[in-house]
Amino acid sequence: MTKPAHEQTANKSGHFAGLDLDRPIIMGIVNVTPDSFSDGGEAFRVNDAVGRGRAMRAVGADILDIGGESTRPGAEPVPVAEEIRRVVPVIEALADGGALVSIDSRRAAVMTAALTAGARIVNDVTALSGDPTSLGVVADSGASVVLMHMQGVPQTMQKNPTYDVPSRDIRRYLAGRIAVCEAAGIAREKIAIDPGVGFGKNLDHNLELLAHLDVLHDLGCPIVLGASRKRFIGRLSGADDPQDRVAGSIATALAARALGVQIFRVHDVGETKQAFDVWEAIQRGAIDVLDQSERGQDRRQRNVTIRDPTP
């Protein structure tokens, strides 16, 4: 029997950062920033950020992604020392509590401080190309890494982005970054890839990419999707406030799961997990019914008596 796309592709890489990829993995977003596009300022204080991370973990987050610098369109860089000051105490508190923590940063010094504080994953919007020493930091630490595609830089990335075919161009870029990482000593099993929805892409680019996420599977790395509350959802639905885009975010996640995406970076952990729990149960039920039907048909065929046509 032919299995659905997500069953065929979801286990290609087996594990990432110690997590089994036979189910959707949820990465909860904890922004320790005053200016992130969706929730800037809500968890800017250490205690608030730690509380948010713990609450996300309680409702199903597998990874907590801690960021101290906004990379929204038009965002200005934060001084390295300030970024470190924001994220390190949050990472220490959450990692000490047993959480699997990711650091969302493009600076090698921040990565180093975060890994020392207990982070085990580096999530870099520049795919380890923005800081010349970041490749060495990840390779030497043995950390896992998420390589994201971004055309341009946050300050200018939404000014007339251009592609031939987005999914194909992004696949080519990520293949190149994987090769660079491997040459630097980062094992492929340590790498996940993120096509970078909304990072240097207009609405049409995002939709083409989301419809063809499965072209990334042959790169042999788990796929991370970060589409939660993004602007394209507002454009399609009329939801101007990012906090009104939860339903659209979940719809996007389910569509991506059907194409075999394994890891989902989201703001709304509990709602997303509930949707996945129901969706996965329905998929398993459909497969079980088909399996039972085929087994029954096989039994009926074996029980058919072929009569001798001769008198």
Image (cartoon, rainbow, N blue to C red):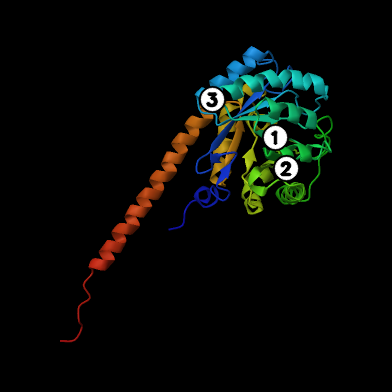
Query: CB atoms at circles 2 and 1 under 8 Å apart?
Result: no
Q: Relative to residue 73, is residue 282 drawn left or right?
A: left
Number of numbered markers: 3
Residue 70 horizontal/vertical position (percent): 75, 25
Tell me the residue at 32%/53% (across/down).
292
CA separation in Å, label 3 and label 1: 18 Å
Residue 253 horizontal/vertical position (percent): 57, 37
Q: Relative to residue 256, is residue 126 drawn left or right?
A: right
Q: Quadrant of the N terminus?
A: bottom left
CA separation in Å, label 2 and label 1: 22 Å
Q: Secondary structure at mark 1?
A: strand
Nearer mark to the viewer, of 2 and 1: 1
Residue 7 horizontal/vertical position (percent): 50, 49
Q: Residue furthest bottom?
A: 311
Nearer mark to the viewer, of 2 and 3: 3
Q: Secondary structure at mark 3?
A: helix
Question: In the image, which disc is placed on residue 57?
Answer: 3
Give, as a three-letter code, the residue at label 3.
Answer: Arg
Q: Relative to residue 303, is residue 134 drawn left or right?
A: right
Q: Quadrant of residue 252?
A: top right
Tell me the residue at 54%/25% (across/down).
57
Give, as a three-letter code, the residue at label 1.
Answer: Asn
The residue carrying mark 1 is 123
Q: Quadrant of residue 116?
A: top right
